Image: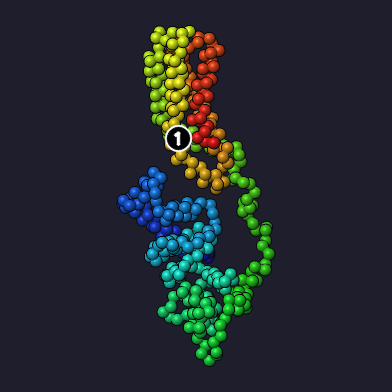
């Protein structure tokens, strides 16, 4: 569907679409089932395939795409819902100046009448392609007429069939003979609309009229530096929104380090004695375990973000490195703070080796134990 309209009609359609949007918003505020649907989607519960199809279609309709190829959009819907959807799509085509090719299986007459152009396919051939108003006149020119009480869509599906074609023959003064699909194609090429279409296709396209931005020359819409800046800004915003989580993690590791100081106090653990070596091993194991599992709270956040990341990456919003690099850079200072707090508060109070080199070695190993929580989640 794609047709030019006047300014007054465009204004009327825009106003009608605005009213439809208001109805949708009021419906979403009042209807509990839709609210439960949105909540279930946000919580990754099991939803019907129709709900996901509606979400995907809505996401594409508000995007930058200008051509939509839709196949069997009426599957699982009643005729009234199909009519409302096709009506809205027609308004969208006329107002937003987009092109849609929609295939429907046995559409209702009211839904069929909403289309601007018809493409009739049969046995791999285009039998007719042109305005919806002229499709019946084409078949009447070859001797077939749609009955008054017969739906046009049903007629178009049956007129090319060998079994059902004869009942639509209306030239009683001439004997009926079966018209195959290639014969229909030949008649269409000699028909006025078919000849006009052939003439339009024979005219080469004037590239001088093409907008410079129509041809995509780069893989991504903006430069790599701008992509990186945008991902940094988004990650910083997400970190500010999750500030409570990071404050809680820092507070938790501080409290656990204070508990470690009292449990493995150095006055109760003599260095240089074999029987106290197990206590030092226990302190080391407890330290590494707390540091490692302190970052597991971010696993749930990561799992929720991965579907969005995969979808945006496949849609060429940004490369994977632009998504991962800000996360690594922002998480490293946090891991340094957490490991530094633990080592500063527990190293000398537990009674490890007092040499500065051993202290630095402990700090490095504790810092390395935070790497899985930072990197493995995003690789």
Residue 71 in the image: state x and y as whole percent.
50, 62
Residue 375 in the image: state x and y as whole percent.
53, 32
Instruction: Tell me the residue at 43%/11% (across/down).
Output: 276
Specify the farthest residue to the front. Answer: 275
Left or right: 131, with 32 as reference point: right
Instruction: Tell me the residue at 50%/60% (across/down).
Output: 70
Q: Classify 270 as above or below 45.
A: above
Quarter holding the C terminus is top right
Label 1 crowding class (10 Å Cα cut-off): few <14, some 14-19, many 20+? some
* 232, 292: nearer the viewer: 292
Q: Classify 139 as above or below 330.
A: below
Residue 181 shows in the view: yes
Instruction: Tell me the residue at 56%/85% (across/down).
Output: 177
Residue 7 shows in the view: no
* 323, 275: nearer the viewer: 275
Residue 41 in the image: state x and y as whole percent.
40, 47
Q: Classify 245 as above or below 263.
A: below
* Residue carrying label 1: 299
Instruction: Tell me the residue at 42%/56% (across/down).
Output: 50
* 288, 147: nearer the viewer: 288
């Amino acid at each position: 569907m794609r047709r030019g309209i006047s300014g007054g009609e465009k204004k009327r359609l825009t106003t009608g679409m605005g009213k439809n949007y208001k109805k949708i918003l009021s419906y979403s505020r009042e209807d509990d089932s839709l609210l439960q649907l949105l909540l279930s989607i946000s919580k990754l519960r099991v939803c019907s395939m129709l709900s996901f199809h509606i979400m995907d279609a809505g996401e594409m309709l508000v995007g930058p795409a200008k051509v939509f190829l839709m196949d069997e959009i009426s599957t699982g819907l009643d005729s009234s819902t199909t009519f409302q959807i096709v009506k809205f799509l027609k308004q969208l085509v006329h107002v937003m100046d987009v092109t849609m090719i929609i295939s429907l299986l046995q559409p209702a007459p009211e839904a069929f009448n909403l289309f601007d152009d018809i493409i009739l396919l049969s046995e791999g051939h285009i039998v007719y392609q042109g305005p919806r108003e002229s499709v019946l006149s084409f078949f009447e020119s070859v001797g077939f007429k749609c009955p008054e009480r017969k739906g046009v869509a049903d007629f178009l599906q049956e007129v090319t069939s060998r079994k059902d074609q004869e009942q639509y023959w209306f030239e009683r003064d001439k004997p009926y003979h079966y018209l195959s699909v290639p014969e229909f194609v030949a008649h269409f090429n000699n028909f006025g609309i078919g000849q006009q279409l052939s003439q339009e296709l024979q005219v080469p396209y004037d590239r001088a009229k093409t907008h410079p931005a129509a041809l995509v020359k780069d893989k991504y819409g903006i430069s790599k530096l701008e992509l990186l800046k945008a991902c940094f800004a988004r990650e910083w915003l997400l970190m500010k929104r999750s500030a409570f989580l990071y404050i809680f993690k820092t507070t938790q590791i501080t409290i656990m380090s204070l508990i470690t100081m009292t449990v493995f106090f150095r006055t109760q653990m003599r260095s240089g004695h074999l029987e106290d070596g197990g206590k030092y091993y226990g302190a080391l194991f407890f330290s590494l375990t707390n540091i490692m599992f302190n970052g597991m709270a971010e696993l749930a956040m990561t799992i929720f973000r991965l579907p969005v990341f995969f979808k945006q990456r496949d849609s060429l919003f940004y490369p994977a490195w632009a998504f991962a690099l800000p996360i690594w850079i922002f998480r490293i200072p946090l891991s340094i703070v957490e490991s530094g707090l633990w080592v500063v508060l527990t190293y000398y109070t537990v009674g490890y080796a007092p040499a500065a080199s051993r202290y630095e070695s402990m700090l490095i190993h504790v810092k390395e134990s935070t790497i899985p929580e930072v990197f493995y989640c995003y690789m």
